[in-house]
Amino acid sequence: QVQLIESGGGLVQAGGSLRLSCAASGRTFSNYVMGWFRQAPEKEREFVARITWNGGVTYYADSMKGRFTISRDKAKNTVYLQMNNLKPEDTAVYYCAAKWGAGTEYTYWGQGTQVTVSS
């Protein structure tokens, strides 16, 4: 049974930083792509960043470039999202997700972790 468990969310002031973690278990994630998404109240879920498990190739939503960094630790089966210079508009529930590299849909999702940025 695949599990993705996020942690690291919390309350931070604008300009601060947080590092989210996503502990993955239940299968081998070779050839998978790991992603971070977020959903703010009354808004659609939006893509944040993704990374290939094998090669560590990254891709970011334009609005996150330069402030957010996605990484993975294969030995710990964990994906991270380092978020710097946080803004109130970054307030959302952040979700970790996984999909087969060639697939179009993310098939596994975590339960989410709340990030709140105060002004």
Image: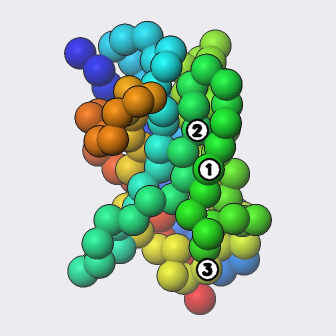
Residue 50, position in %: x, y? 54, 45
Label annotation for residue 87: 3
Nearer to me, 59 or 68: 59
Q: Are marks 1 and 3 in contact (CB under 8 Å)?
A: no
- Which quadrant would the C terminus be assigned to in this image? bottom right
The image quadrant of residue 18 is bottom right
| Image quadrant containing the N terminus | top left
Q: For the residues carrying marks 1 and 3, which lies nearer the camera in this image? A: 1
In screen coordinates, is 71 left or right of 94?
right
Q: Which mark is residue 4?
A: none
State which quadrant residue 99 falls in. Answer: top left
Residue nearer the viewer, 56 or 85: 56
For disc 2, the marked residue is 51
For label 1, the crowd category at 10 Å Cα-Cα, with few meaning under 14, some 14 to 19 and many 20 or more, is some
Tag count: 3
Residue of label 1 = 59
Tell me whether circle 2 and circle 3 mark residues in contact (CB < 8 Å): no
Q: At label 2, which amino acid type do we have?
A: Ile
Residue found 54% across the figure and 82% down from its top: 88
